[in-house]
């Protein structure tokens, strides 16, 4: 544990602050966007959370590549804690008397205002389910990414970075979606197992496509971080 904390502190010193900021924003935003269903059929389901969840997983791949899975996972826990803090603030805002700007529709003000309060305020089982799913999937993604890296003879190069990221992201996202679907959607909304599985697969594919599109940028960022590490090592 001490080694993981030491790696985490070293990571915070050298990783670009913008990267860490985007990760936290992605974790907070994807849980909020998950409230919007894009497709909800008997055999297929997909929510808007995938628009941001790929960013959190790409960042975890970068951190795992540069600092190892322990530090990346510890940062995932840190991001989750900040997400829970934001969830608490959203909940407090939803309970404070007031009117949302979008609720000014003649005859429907109260209904819309209540709906917005409920959306931002969140529900305990959704927050608990999403938090559990994120931590489980972060552990799977980070250590799977590192495990694949150890199997490769040459761990450098974009092709190897991409292979590690694509495999770990798809499986990690599948686990994330499936755990959430089983804990929340199936128990509280009556989803069938087919919906849970198809949602997990569909979401993983959609998020993987974003990973593929932005992995060249992720690789360049990881190379810059490694260059900083090498410079720091030479100075030390």
Image (cartoon, grey):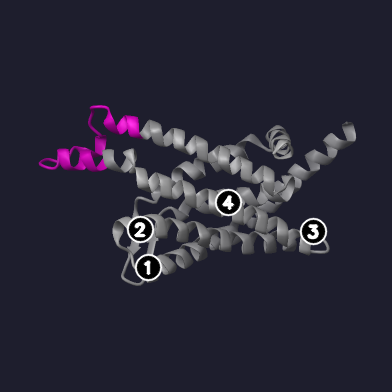
Q: SS at mark 1?
A: helix
75 or 211: which is nearer to us?
75
Residue that carries the numbered disc 2 in the rendered image: 185
- Residue in the picture at 70% in, 53% down: 219
For the view shown, which residue lies furthest in the front direction?
Answer: 1
Quickly name the residue at label 3. 155
Direction from residue 152 to residue 144 in the image, left or right: left
Image disc number at residue 138: 4
The residue stretch that appears in magenta: 91-116
Q: Position of residue 157 (x, y in %)?
A: 78, 59
| Residue positioned 25% across, 39% down in the render | 102
Q: Nearer the viewer, residue 144 or 94?
A: 144
Q: Quadrant of residue 180?
A: bottom left
**First reached walking from the N terminus: tag 2 or tag 3:** 3
Contact (Cβ within 8 Å) of mark 1 with mark 2: yes
Mark 1 vs mark 3, CA separation in Å: 38 Å
């Amino acid at each position: 544990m001490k080694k993981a904390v030491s790696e985490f502190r070293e990571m915070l010193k050298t990783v670009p602050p913008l990267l860490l900021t985007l990760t936290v924003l992605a974790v907070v935003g994807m849980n909020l966007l998950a409230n919007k269903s894009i497709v909800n059929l008997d055999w297929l389901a997909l929510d808007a959370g995938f628009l941001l969840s790929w960013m959190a997983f790409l960042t975890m791949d970068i951190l795992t590549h540069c600092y190892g899975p322990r530090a990346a996972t510890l940062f995932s826990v840190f991001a989750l804690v900040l997400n829970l803090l934001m969830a608490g603030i959203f909940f407090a805002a939803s309970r404070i008397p007031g009117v949302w700007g979008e609720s000014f529709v003649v005859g429907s003000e109260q209904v819309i205002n209540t709906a917005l309060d409920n959306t931002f305020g969140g529900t305990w089982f959704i927050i608990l389910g999403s938090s559990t799913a994120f931590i489980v999937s972060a552990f799977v993604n980070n250590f799977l990414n590192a495990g694949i890296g150890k199997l490769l003879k040459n761990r450098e190069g974009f092709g190897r970075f991409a292979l590690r990221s694509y495999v770990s992201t798809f499986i990690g996202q599948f686990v994330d979606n499936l755990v959430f679907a089983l804990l929340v959607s199936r128990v509280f909304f009556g989803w069938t197992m087919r919906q849970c599985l198809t949602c997990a697969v569909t979401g993983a594919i959609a998020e993987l496509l974003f990973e593929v599109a932005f992995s060249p940028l992720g690789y360049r960022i990881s190379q810059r971080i490694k260059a900083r590490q090498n410079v720091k090592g030479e100075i030390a």
